[in-house]
Image: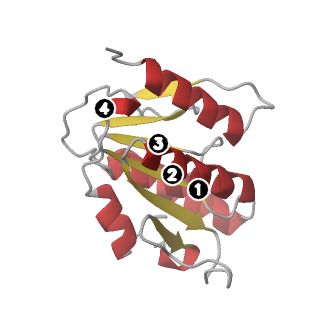
Amino acid sequence: MGVKDNIKRKLSDFSFQRKGSPNREVKAINIKHAQTVGIVYRADNDESKELVERYVKFLKEYKIRCKTLGYYNLDELPRYVTPKLEFDYFLKKDLNWKLETKASEVLNFVQSEFDILIDATVNEDDVIRFVVKQSIARFKVGGAKKGLDDLDFTINLQPKEGVRQLMKGLDNYLHLINKD
C-alpha cells in the first residue's frame, strides 16, 4: 500500500466515522419471509461473483426479489460483464477522494428498503462499508470484521474460511431466525 493509498484510507476513516447512519427500523427476518434481498459484494472476485449469482437463483425459487451491487476496482467494466435486471455494478472511477460514490446505481441501492441486506465480503473493504452503512435495509448481515459495527448480525469466520463459508453460514442462520 502506497503513501497515496494510506492518505485515502485515513481520510476515508475520518469521513466514515463522521457520517451518520440513516434512521431505520431494525427487524430480524427469516429468509422465507423476506420479500426483498440486497447483496453487496466484490465483483472482481470470481468466487464471490459466482456464489452471488447462484444465491440469487436460489432466492428466486422462494419468490424473493433480489438486487445485487458489485464493485469492480477498475476504471471500466470488463467486456464480459453486462448489467442485468438484478445485477448492478459500480467502479473505482465512480469513487471520490473519501472513497464514497454518487453513482446512481449505488444511490438507488442504498435507498431501497430491503428486508435483508447481505454483505458478501470476507475482508474489511473501505468501499463496501460505505454502501452497507448508508443502506436503509431492515436487517443487515455479513461476516464479522474488526472495528465495523454497521451489521445487525455477523458470522465469525476462521482465518482460512472464505466467501463460500460466509454464504453457507448466513443462509443457515437466515433460515433459523424467527422460524415459525
Q: Is disc 4 placed on a helix, strand or loop?
A: helix
Tell me: 106 left or right of 87. Answer: left
Q: Nearer the viewer, mark 2 or mark 3?
A: 2
Residue at (60% x, 37% y) in the render: 167
Label 1 near label 4: C-beta < 8 Å? no
User: Which image quarter: residue 178?
Assistant: top left
Q: Percent x, y for residue 93? A: 54, 79
Task: Name the residue located 58 percent from the left edge and 31 percent from the top edge.
Answer: 146
Where residue 30 appears, x then y in whole percent?
A: 36, 26
Residue designated by label 3: 118
Task: Return the disc, 2 or 3, that comes first in the chain's sequence.
Answer: 2
Q: In the rendered image, which residue does mark 4 sit on?
A: 33
Dot 4, crowdedness within 10 Å: few (<14), some or many (≥20)? some
| Residue drawn at (62%, 62%) of the image | 43
Q: Nearer the viewer, mark 1 or mark 3?
A: 1
Q: Which amino acid does label 2 sit on?
A: Val
> Which residue position holds label 2?
56
Earlier residue among tags 4 and 1: 4
Instruction: Tell me: 1 left or right of 89.
Output: right
How far apart are labels 4 and 1 at the CA level? 21 Å
Horizontal and vertical percent position of residue 61: 45, 45
Which residue lies under the disc numbered 1? Answer: 53
Q: Which residue is drawn at 40% across and 43% down?
A: 117
Please determine whether, in this image, residue 109 is positioned above or below residue 122: below
